[in-house]
Structure formats: C-alpha cells, structure tokens
Amino acid sequence: MDLSVPLAWLVDEASASPEPDSFLSDLGRRLVADGLPLAAGALTLAVPHPIIARRTWLWRAESGVVIESLGFAGAVSDRAGEEWLAGFGPVLQPSAKLGREHARLSWAGSRPFDPEETARLHEVERFAVAPLAVLAERAALTALLDAYLGRRSAARVRAGALTRGTGETIRAALLYADLRNFTALSETSEPAVVIAALDAWFDRLAGAIHAFGGEVLKFIGDGVLAIFPVSGSPGEACDAALRAVSAARAGMAHLDETRQAEGLPPLSFGVALHLGDILWGNIGAADRLDFTAIGPAVNLVSRLEGLCRPLGRSVLISGAVAEATSMPLLPLGEHSLRGIAAPCAVFTLPDA
C-alpha cells in the first residue's frame, strides 16, 4: 500500500511518541512538509482526574512550539483547542462520524482548505485513531497515578520502580501535620460533616505544599506526610517547607472564619518540619505495594508533631531545619521524643 509520509508515520511510528505534545508537533511538521497549508493544530485528550477533565496541546506551525491548556471539570467550554485555533485561520473540525470522547484532533489553515486538502486531513484523522488511543490510555494512567501517588512518586512507578524493597535514599525536608480533636469530631458529627472537614483541611494543606514545590506522600487518617526533596541547597527545601506552612496556616485561618460564621468549631492542628535522609520506594506485601518514605527522619518528624499539644504550639521545627534555613525562628530548647534516642533541638515560628 502506497502511503504518504504522514500516514506511514502514523501507522509505523506514532504510537511510540513519548508524549502527546511530541505526537502533535511531529505530525504537524510532516503534514506541512507534505504540502498542507497548516497554521496551527490542537490535540485534546480526556483524562480521569479529580479536577482536570481534559488536556489540550496547542501547536503553532510557524514556530513549532507546543503549549498546554488544562480543561477543568465543570468548565463552561470543552473546546479550548478549537477556540484557540480560530485565531489562526479557518478551522477544520474533527469528522463527526469519527469523533471520539477520549481524543480530538483539529487544525487551522493559513487559508481555507480546498476539498482535496480537507479529504486528506480527514484521512489523517482516520489513521490517527489507533495511535491516539494509545496516547489517551497512557495519559489516563498518568492522571490516575498522579492523583493517587503524587507527581514524583507516580513518575517513579511509571518508569518501572515496581519491585518490593527497591527505592532510593534522598534528602528532603519532611512535613508532618495532624488535626486536633478529630476523634471527638468523628464521634459527634455525621460522616458527611466529617468528610467535608477533612477535605477542607487537606485542600488548604496540600494546596500550600504543592504551591511551594512539595509533594504529599500520604494521607494518614487526618494526618499528612509530605516531602520537599533537596535538589539544590538544603536551605532552599527548608525555606519552601516553611513557606508552605505559613500559607497553610493562612488558609486554615480563613477557613475557621468561614466555619465560625456557620456555627462550626475551628479546626486546630499541629505541624512539624524536619530535614533528613529517607528511603523513598516500595514497601508492602508481595501483591500490594505502597510507594512511600520510611526511615529515622520520618519517625522523628511524626514524634516531633506529637509535641505540639504539650508545648502549646501549632508549628514545631527541628534543629536540622533551623540550621539550614535563613528564616527567623524561636528556640524552645531540647526535648526528648518518644522512641528517639537523642534529644531534639526544637524551634517554632515567632507567631506560632
């Protein structure tokens, strides 16, 4: 069968495209080289994610640059690609009979497409169905792993880190946080009220962690374990963790104002920070694994958080973080931690 260069590429190579953006730019470049008057292209894939409904990649023929647009669940329009393409020229919509929920491929021309060019692009669409299905499945898996494992951990799993006991030792600023009086709240409130409170707490804390480059490793009941991996200096990771704590406290203060207006009690909490080495990898049963962090540093940060109530502080910081950060901290002396041999130098924020 004598196929054009773009169609032959779709049959033989496109399914191996590492990412949707490279698929779109490679296909667009081949179509332009094959004589089609393209100004831009858009590829949209549906993804199963708690807040992101679809991802759209936008390619500009003149520069070859690809940018990404996210479509959130409940958004008014799900046609970001076509709306963007309209600014470049006449838009060729996907064929109605070939329209797929999982993928949509559209083009804008530098001039109106003639009937022969339109037919060629619809043929491209037909040949693209199989590789787009592969890309859509891969994007769906990525979205699910990111949502349940976190971006960094999900990337490790996708790369093949699937064997129990395997992992790597990394240095990171660790954050452990826990709600106060959660047991009493659970026993005196309807389940829906408890879940709403937990979701609001996790939103403020996880949002702050992610905003400053950290990653939530695990939700533990009403607690959170997160890391800020050291990629430059340890001080940068510690400063990021401290800024995340400050942002989370501000978010929780605003939430408590809202809860008070609704006649609900405030959600008090404790947060601890520590800097240390952790083993980041797979633990668990032979057929049920958890990708998480373990090690003495994890034990210390969880025990340190347990001192928040006895010391009457909402934020406690280890001496290791205090040595690495340039932010002003208030010393609270050395304290023994349950199960930890050596006393820990403890600090806090001036207003915590």
Image (cartoon, rainbow, N blue to C red):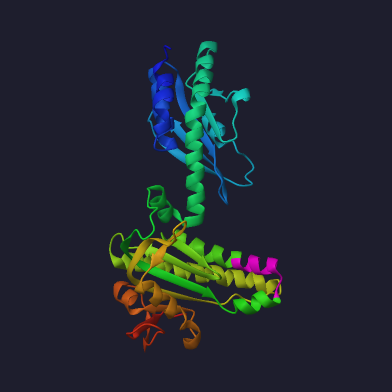
Which percent across, then down, holds residue 4? Answer: 41, 15
**Left or right placement of residue 101 versus residue 154 in this view:** right
| Residue that appears at 39% across and 58% down | 164
Residue 239: quadrant of the picture: bottom left
Asked whether residue 191 is in view, the answer is yes
Compared to residue 237, the image places residue 5 above or below, namely above
| Residue that appears at 36% across and 78% down | 318
Q: Nearer the viewer, residue 80 or 146?
A: 146
Task: Residue 190: say if magenta.
Answer: yes
Q: Nearer the viewer, residue 336 or 162?
A: 162
Asked whether residue 349 is in view, the answer is no
Which percent across, then down, holds residue 292? Answer: 42, 62
Which percent across, then down, holds residue 56? Answer: 51, 38
**Left or right placement of residue 59 versus residue 324 in this view:** right
Residue 289: quadrant of the picture: bottom left
Q: Residue furthest left?
A: 233
| Residue that appears at 55% across and 23% down | 92
Magenta stretch, main secondary structure, is helix
Which percent across, then down, holds residue 117? Answer: 50, 14
Image: magenta residue range: 189-198
Compared to residue 275, the image places residue 145 above or below, namely above
